[in-house]
Image: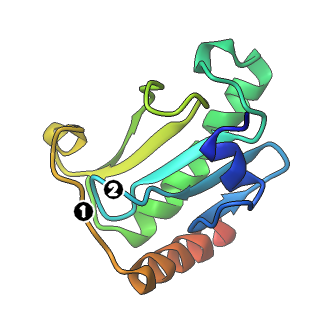
């Protein structure tokens, strides 16, 4: 059975898309730790990130870098924190989180809430920044 992320990449489930290539897909996390918290996935469903073949893994991080640079242009932050946890959804994914301190990446913190309009506008702004890179 396809993971929720595969369904998002296949547009069977709606998402706030940031960027997409033939192999990768980036979208806003709907339960974000910070404004601009984005998930980046390979379109090919692989559960464990260390099982991704080297070339595709490198491509995932190069794609993530460009997405992260776009987020930085839109969301005020000191850095984009990058983490891979891999337990919550059986589909490898990278979290890109705008941070100002190490504590901003504590997944025990309360999640932020945004309206659909706020998510759509943020995604639009990051998409534009991504396209300009």
Circle 1 packing at 10 Å, graded few (<14), some (14-19), many (20+), is few
Residue for point 85% across, 49% down: 22
Viewer-nearest residue: 23 or 114 = 114
In whole angstroms, how far apart are the C-alphas of marks 1 and 2? 6 Å
The residue pinned by badge 1 equals 112
The residue pinned by badge 2 equals 32
Circle 2 packing at 10 Å, graded few (<14), some (14-19), many (20+), is many
Query: Regarding mark 1 in the picture, which secondary structure is present there?
Result: loop
Q: Earlier in the sequence, mark 1 or mark 2?
A: 2
Residue for point 58% across, 45% down: 40
Which residue of the protein is positioned furthest toward the top in this rendering?
51
- The reply, left or right, for residue 72 in relation to residue 2 is left
Quadrant that contains the N terminus: top right
- The reply, left or right, for residue 106 in relation to residue 34 is left
x and y, in percent, of residue 10 in the image: 78, 54
Q: Is residue 39 above or below residue 116?
A: above
Query: Regarding mark 2 in the picture, which secondary structure is present there?
Result: loop
> Disc number at residue 90?
none
- The reply, left or right, for residue 57 in relation to residue 81 is right
Quadrant that contains the C terminus: bottom right
C-beta proximity under 8 Å, tags 1 and 2:
yes
Q: Is residue 27 above or below residue 46?
A: below
Residue for point 71% across, 19% down: 52
Q: Is residue 24 above or below residue 38?
A: above
Q: Is residue 104 above or below residue 58?
A: below
Which residue of the protein is positioned furthest toward the front in this rendering?
1
Which residue of the protein is positioned furthest toward the right in this rendering?
22
x and y, in percent, of residue 49 in the image: 60, 21
Q: Quadrant of residue 129?
A: bottom right
x and y, in percent, of residue 122 in the image: 45, 76
x and y, in percent, of residue 45 in the image: 73, 32
Colour logic? rainbow
């Amino acid at each position: 059975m396809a993971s929720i992320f595969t369904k998002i990449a296949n547009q069977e489930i709606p998402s706030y898309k940031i960027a997409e290539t033939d192999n990768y897909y980036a979208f806003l996390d709907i339960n974000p730790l910070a404004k601009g918290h984005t998930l980046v996935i390979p379109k090919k469903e692989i559960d464990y990130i260390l099982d991704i073949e080297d070339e595709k893994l490198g491509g995932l991080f190069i794609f993530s870098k460009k997405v992260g640079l776009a987020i930085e242009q839109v969301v005020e932050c000191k850095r984009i924190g990058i983490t891979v946890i891999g337990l919550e959804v059986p589909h490898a994914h990278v979290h890109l989180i705008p941070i100002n301190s190490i504590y901003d990446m504590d997944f025990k913190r309360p999640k932020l809430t945004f309206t659909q309009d706020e998510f759509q506008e943020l995604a639009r702004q990051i998409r534009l920044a991504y396209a300009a890179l």
